Image (cartoon, helix red, strand yellow):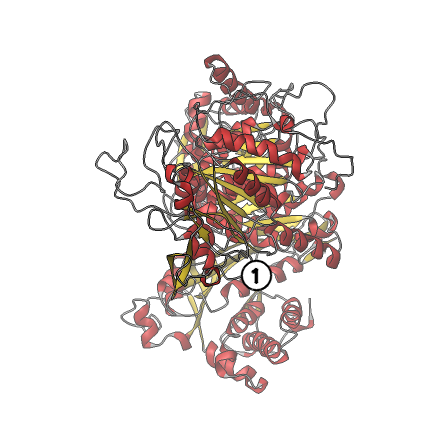
Amino acid sequence: MSTATASTDRNVNIERVDNITVRFAGDSGDGMQLAGTQLTNTSAIFGNDISTLPDFPAEIRAPAGSLAGVSGYQIHFSKERIHTPGDVCDALVAMNPAALKTNLADLRKDGVLLINIDAFTKGNLAKAGYETSPLEDDSLQSYRVFEVAIDKLTSEAAKDTGLANKALLRTKNFFALGLIYWLYGRPMDASLEWIDKKFGKSPDVASANSKALKAGFYYGETTEAFTVRYEVDRAAIKPGRYRKVTGNEAVALGLIAAANLADKTLFYGSYPITPASDILHDLSRYTHYNVKTFQAEDEIAAIASVVGAAYTGACAATGTSGPGLALKAEAIGLGVMTELPMVIVNVQRGGPSTGLPTKTEQADLLQALYGRNGECPLPVLAPRSPSDCFAMSIEAFRIAIKYMTPVILLTDGYLANGAEPWLLPDVASLPDLHVEHPKANGEAFLPYSHDERLSRPWAIPGTPGLEHRIGGIEKEDGTGNVCYDPDNHEHMINLRERKVQGIADDIPLQEVEGAEDADLLVVGWGSTYGAIISAVERANAKGQKVACAQIRYLSPFPRNLGDVLKKYKKVLVPEMNLGQLLMKLRSEYLVDAVGFNKVQGKPFQINELSDKIDEMVKG
Amino acid sequence: MPVDVELKELTAKDFASDQDVRWCPGCGDYSILAQMKKILPKLNLPKENVLFVSGIGCSSRFPYYMDTYGIHSIHGRAPAVATGVKAARPDLHVWVVTGDGDGLSIGGNHLIHAIRRNVDLTILLFNNRIYGLTKGQYSPTSERGKRTKSSPAGSIDYPLQPLCLAIGAEATFVARTHDVNVKHLASTLERAARHKGTSFVEIYQNCNIFNNHAFEYATGKDTRSDSTIVLEHGRPLIFGKEGNKGIRLNGINPEIVELGNGVKEDDLLFHDEKTPEPTLAYMLSRMYHPEFPEPIGVYRSIERPTYEGMLEDMVQNSIEQKGRGKLEDLLNSGDTWTVK
């Protein structure tokens, strides 16, 4: 541990705990996301397992002090393997009354409540809807409240940098961070280094931030108010090289990796939409990996450009969220009809319509599977954690190229913005996606001839002798000529369906985790994995027998899924929708599965699932 | 992709596909198809590098009749599909074939944005002022008061002028031609194809089934000299059967004058397709029949870097500066730490 955490003269008890969940909450301009990421990085480097979730408002700059403008960042760090950002918080940093009001419900009783009293002015209290100050009544008595004059202490700490007070106050997030570092025995080194690197060009700003961080830390150390500090030991983590990764970052890296593995240009055509835009931002920085990004004029142009780029032989992808997927439906159908490889990333958010743009949901499953005109099958994949987004993005391209089909990758806001440590894969272990494009061989070229996989040749413009036309009108099998013949149409409908179903032979069987002889199977998909596996581990730890299966391949399903489901007396399907996977499972396998649904724009808590599991086990 | 094989000399026949052409007999599209096959060999391009992209509508069947690469896409989206093609493969020679419904109504947005980006596409807008494939509804270019199946009492829509739109979107090459004067059609197509950047060509095209004779004034032997004016760079705007009428500026407005009686050629407006300001081209695009003769020919032809060229430069420059990225470095970018 760094010298910064040297023991003090003061008598402070050190309590060792297994894990801690901290939430920073403040105005969207208060730098809460930054404080959260700093605590995350420090904890990861320290050796804890981590899981995080930012929670930002849909408004970029809602009026200061308003409830709509509260921005939060939650981090869970642990000495054990963890899979979620934590159900309830052990500590809440509330930078103003609005932050207190909107976040207090998630703080556990007896939790640490760090309040910036300087922001508890009459005006701010009114904006948050407090008639009387919660600091002056007994509404906070079940928490361990620490009232700190963060504004004043921050200004004081860094006033000799010569910065104006307004600029000084911008560093108050670092003061709060410093105090949290002290409270949880975190070293300051990584953040101090980060500050130097980030603000190196403005030494006074760098200095102000460093001073604020240290002031917060030493405030904890010297103030009598704090009598306990907590320590969370390093976790037993698999050795190797790690980085922290969000789902959106992992998708971007996965798409680039796939194109590089195919030795192709990555073309990413996309229209800005929350919460998918970060993929576009990330890819735009990676042009030297032969990445071309195209910010299209609208969602339809984005997918249309992808169809064009795919025809010419690029690894073409687009990213969007629910409303954008709806707009893209017709052109995805063109992708299916023209049998071209492309990846469509749908970062799901609360719907319908504009819905809850910054919140998470899983309600686009049926849209992904069926939301196009006509019989329009395509593979749908769903990563189960932020780092899994990397592997599944590569997998999406592998399937797209091998089977000449659009593939939808379903992530969600929770995966997209949540972060976890990622054990970097060995590049040599990644699949070879190299493609042999056909060349003229003297015989008549049949652009719609289908091989044993029912995949057609990917002949690309610039190849002499293979000139051919594709399009959205029904094609004759083989020649690809426009064809209105009824039998050919039915044949092609079946062919496209069988092609997608056949991919089941080329994907892993469904894995099951948890108790071997369980009576209850919990089946989920996508981002619910963390909460489900945690709840199932808890259930088994207390003697219940529960297993779980997280489905990563939603179309086609793994070959053994039906057998897996039928092995259990009871099947529980938790989803952040009204039961879309449940409907698929019940109709496809005739199992009497039970749904457990939460559609609040928030992920499942482990406790909620544990309660439901208890009920199912008993019932 | 450099092509260093010796180019075989191609003829119009080489560009004909084996598909039966299914336009109605007498359709103006036949004439455009014939001229396209004639001018393509002149461009000295490898056939395999030519690609036609279209949307939906009668004109959009065009790619099926060309023995080149082609995408018959979905309604209105051809410019966006073509932008993806060009962005990924700047080496391809890309044509977009669209119509007044496809390009100006359902696909208006894509048309504007392809043009403003100056993607190196040659966009041909077959304007027949009617929806043909859906059997005769008024289109965005139909004149007000037009009686069609969907406007039995006469259309109450004000029409859109394709060239005004293209010039407003800063097109670097803008021209108008028609399906009857095949020589003019061929030379306009060829010039448009040779232009680097977005070329926008409005082609007056007769739909003899649903809107026959819509452009009779501009194409008919007896009327065309008085109702059109052929633009020539650096030349005064003169028209009329006798070649005795001209366009002169009166303040900022064009007016028709007769030559003679003190009006000399030098008093007339001189065409300048190279002027960077689009004002002249825009003014010409606002001259409508019957008040004015409608200009035929190249309105504007200026140089500006292309979208796909700048995109390619961006990639190549970043590779030069940072080195071609390797997967190992990609994974290790960002903050990493080692657990022992």
Quarter holding the N terminus of chain A is: bottom right
Indicate left or right for A578 with B299 as reference.
Answer: left
Q: Is residue B261 above or below residue A526?
A: below
Indicate left or right for B211 with A492 as reference.
Answer: left
How many labels, in total? 1
Chain of the residue under label 1? A
Q: Is residue A310 above or below residue A320?
A: above
Provide residue A562's location: percent of width, then percent of height. Answer: 51, 22
- Residue A541 visible: no
SS of the residue at dot 1? helix
Q: Is residue A310 above or below residue A154?
A: above
- In this rendered view, identify the residue nearer to me: B163 or B117: B163
Q: Which residue is rendered at x = 45% and y = 14% of the image?
A: A486
Provide residue B242's location: percent of width, then percent of height. Answer: 43, 47
- In this rendered view, identify the residue nearer to me: A241 or A186: A241
Quarter holding the C terminus of chain A is: top left
- In this rendered view, identify the residue nearer to me: A44 or B55: B55
Q: Badge 1 local density, few (<14 within 10 Å), some, or many (20+)?
A: many
Provide residue A532's location: percent of width, then percent of height. Answer: 50, 40
Query: Which residue does the numbered mark 1 point to in the structure image?
Result: A37
Residue projecting furthest to the left: B153
Q: Which residue is rendered at x = 48% and y = 17% of the image?
A: A489
